[in-house]
Amino acid sequence: MTAISSRQLAALRLLRRRLIQAVPLLLGVVVINFVLIHLAPGSFLELMTAENQVSDPATVALLRKTYGMDDPLWLQLGKYVWALLHFDFGFSYRQNMPVLQAITIHLPATLLLMVSSITLAFAVGVAAGVVASMKVRTAWDTLVSVAAMFFFAAPSFWLGIMMIVLFAVKLGWMPVGGMITIGGGGGILDILHHLVLPTLALGLFYAAIYARVMRSSMLEVSQLDFVRTARAKGLSRRQVTIGHVLRNALLPVVTILGVQMGTVLAGSVVIESVFSWPGVGSLLFDSVSSRNYPVVLGILVLGSLVVIAANIAVDLVYMWLDPRIEIR
Amino acid sequence: MKLDFLGRFSRNRGALAGAVVILGVALLAILAPLVYPTDPLRIVAQPELWPGEEPAYPLGTDSLGRDILAMIVHGARATLLIGLFASAVATVIGVGVGATAGYFGGWIDEIAMRAAELFQTIPNLIFVLTIVVILGSTLQNIVIAIGIVSWTPIARMTRAEFLALRDREFVQACRAMGMGNGRIILGEILPNALPPVIVLSSLVVAGAILFESAVSFLGLGDPNVASWGRLVGDGRQLIRSSWYICAIPGVAIMITVLCLNLIGDGLNDALNPKLRDR
């Protein structure tokens, strides 16, 4: 009983520590991106007034005042941070709704793609790495290395297009794009069907990394003393591999998983464009080309928030896998 | 020592093959204006000729009737140059930050590492796209943007090397002689810290090529440069009739990145012989 609660206590301590550390990190993200966005020549106001054919100087001046554009940069930044604290990311004139709402409409699709890709990458990568390490220097090992090399080098968007050509256009097994079948679709099975190719296109790159790391990590751990002890106790090779080596060998994979969270989120932007997936990527694209900067800034800030949250989750998993480690 | 290194590198067949291919691609890139002296974006034949259909255009033509082989050869130039320069930018930032952090330690180290964490948190490609859109889609800005999101692993590696080296006897001897910090960092520690950093830089080249291809594929690349990523993006509309237009430049990207990775692995093995059997 006491053992359990002390571990839970440690997990809570870790959580609190990470949350406190996240505050300056997030503030840094906001400042960097805010300043970057304000380096832009011409404001979104010019585009907005042009689109709506507003040319009356008095109206423009009023708009500038409403958006606080005549304030010095530090004051605008301060106001933005203050608004963020109240979950106010600004207003998107294009969607005619608050930025936060515009993003959260698109967020679930992106999160779904992210989670399914990471799950696929983790499962395939770990399995392939384990197989390669158990059959080291055999045809299996070579097969895994060659496949890993291939998927590590192939641009994800290109892999996606090639899979569309093969599985959707030629064979007709998969939809070409989108998230649901237009007219009549929308069930869970329908969404999963649409999810297969984007998940493969995004996930296989990471599966390749995890397979390589897992293989070398398995080989390293299997040479440690405690593994020999377990074998000497009379456990079978399979029991030792699954029960002792695997768990310890997972640690480096979990570490890079955490580091790459932002990369996966960013990668989904490209994949969404290939598969017309209705996620944050499509919103980002629209906002970037229309210079709708409040939305771009909001996506960068929220995206970083997702990354920070995912990293905290990874830290907790790490601690669960290796109780010896008290993470700083 | 040098011969030993070359011997170890060339015993790694994959790395050797990678180096040969990359040399070939580099040669192609350098000689592009001689092989195809005319503008590769010029219309030369009827559109959508399949590879092999017309011997004069071995890789076929695209939707406008432009020679795909000519575009690939010229694209090699843009792609390799962007990869190299972006990696150089990342290496300069990474080594600068990492060396300062590792050598001085204390609060400087703390700030540098928090900054690295910050840049790892912001989703990298989204950041690149934003920078490129705001500063303008020029080659120079794309190179800088990719460098800005790629320096953190190099900084961490350099820092670790500096931490390990800064209190060694030869450094203490330099300090005792009254050598300044700048000279110790650049002249004494850096040369010893460089080998693993070089390995990482070669891998960053591969990563930068992938970044650039994604930016160009999305249509945000430099409009005056036909890099391989842009060729994939241009061919996207025609995947039903002429998927080869997309496939060919993608294969070029993949082979180049694959070979750069092989070279990186080979350098790693040759520079850290202890890890060879992993």
Image (tube, coloured by chain):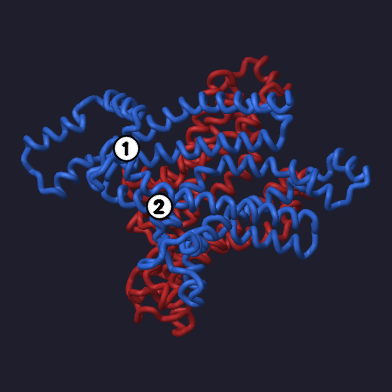
Chain colours: A blue, B red
Q: Chain of mark 1?
A: A
Q: Amino acid at mark 1?
A: Ile
Residue that numbered label 2 is attached to: A279
SS at badge 1 = helix
Residue at 72% from the left image edge and 48% from the top image edge? B269
Residue located 84% across and 44% down the image: A223
How far across and down, in percent of the image, does residue B232 sit? 43, 65
- Residue B195 circle label: none
Chain containing the residue with disc 2 = A
x then y, percent, for residue A30: 39, 32
Quadrant location, the C terminus of chain A: top right
Local packing at callout 2 (Cα closer than 10 Å; few below 14, some 14-19, many 20+) is many
| Residue B244 x %, y % | 46, 74
Query: Could you tell whether A144 is left or right of B250 in the image?
Result: right
Taking the image as shown, residue B138 lies to the left or right of residue A307, namely left
Task: Name the residue beneath numbered marker 1.
Answer: A37
Please say if B10 is above or below B60. above
Q: Nearer the viewer, residue A34 or B265?
A: A34
- Left or right: where B50 falls relative to A2: left
The residue most toward the front is A1
Query: Distance from label 1 to label 2 (Cα)?
Result: 22 Å
Tell me the kind of residue under disc 2: Gly
Q: Position of residue B276 (x, y in %)?
A: 77, 48
Q: At x 83% / y 53%, what residue is drawn?
A: A238
Report if residue A321 is visible in the image: yes
Report the mark closest to the observer, 1 or 2.
Answer: 2
Give the mark, 1 or 2, whose residue is nearer the N terminus.
1
Where the N terminus of chain A falls, by quadrant? top right
